Amino acid sequence: MKIIEKDFRISSKHRNQMIDITSQVGLAISQSGVTNGDAIVYCPHTTAAITINENADPDVPHDILLALAELIPQHQPGFRHSEGNSDAHCKSSMFGCSEQILIKDGTLNLGTWQGIFFCEFDGPRHRKVLVQIRGE
Ligand code: ZN
């Protein structure tokens, strides 16, 4: 079994933003030469996350961010963290910093409507995404 590590950088443009990174992850997998196995897509940041959801209708990521903003407002009287971005830390932990995706016949074995998103919760920033590809 091969284990190959790749990374790429992205820049967010808004404080809260879901960026479709499916093609970048797919490119990393095709460059790895692994045709069957899995990939872990990992975000090494505390105010961002990785998630898989619908990338066909752009209203879906919009509505996810809207619902999150209502659930966790940026400013709450009880927050103590001096950076003022506690909402972003909460959202990061809710979504998690990684996703595992199956690789079949050299491509991402995602559902028809699924895409991989980098979730920015404290942008705009320059960010890094790690991809560990394992398999044959
Ligand atoms: Zn902070």
Image (cartoon, rainbow, N blue to C red):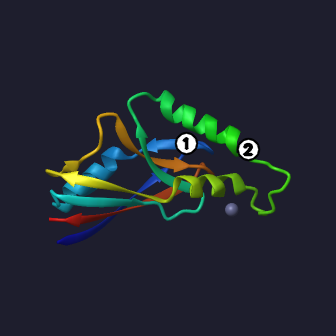
The quarter of the rendering in which ligand 1 is drawn is bottom right
The CA span between labels 2 and 1 is 15 Å
Which amino acid lies under the numbered mark 2 shown in the image of this protein? Pro
The quadrant of the rendering that contains the N terminus is: bottom left
Decide if residue 5 is on the left or right side of residue 128: left
Badge 2, how many Cα within 10 Å: few under 14, some, many 20+? few
Q: Quadrant of residue 90?
A: bottom right
Q: Secondary structure at mark 2?
A: loop
Q: Which residue is identified by label 2?
A: 73
Give the residue at x 85% y 52%. 77
Q: Secondary structure at mark 1?
A: strand
Give the residue at x 55% y 37%. 64
Q: Is residue 56 above or below residue 1?
A: above
Q: Quadrant of residue 114?
A: top left
Please report whichever mark, 2 or 1, sits nearer to the chain's N-terminal start.
Answer: 1
Q: Is residue 132 above or below residue 17?
A: below
Give the residue at x 46% y 43%. 19
Give the residue at x 32% y 52%. 25
Q: Which residue is identified by label 1?
A: 17
In this view, the mark in front (2 or 1)? 2
Viewer-proximal residue among 85 and 104: 104
Q: Is residue 46 above or below residue 10?
A: below
Residues marked 2 and 1 touching at CB (< 8 Å): no
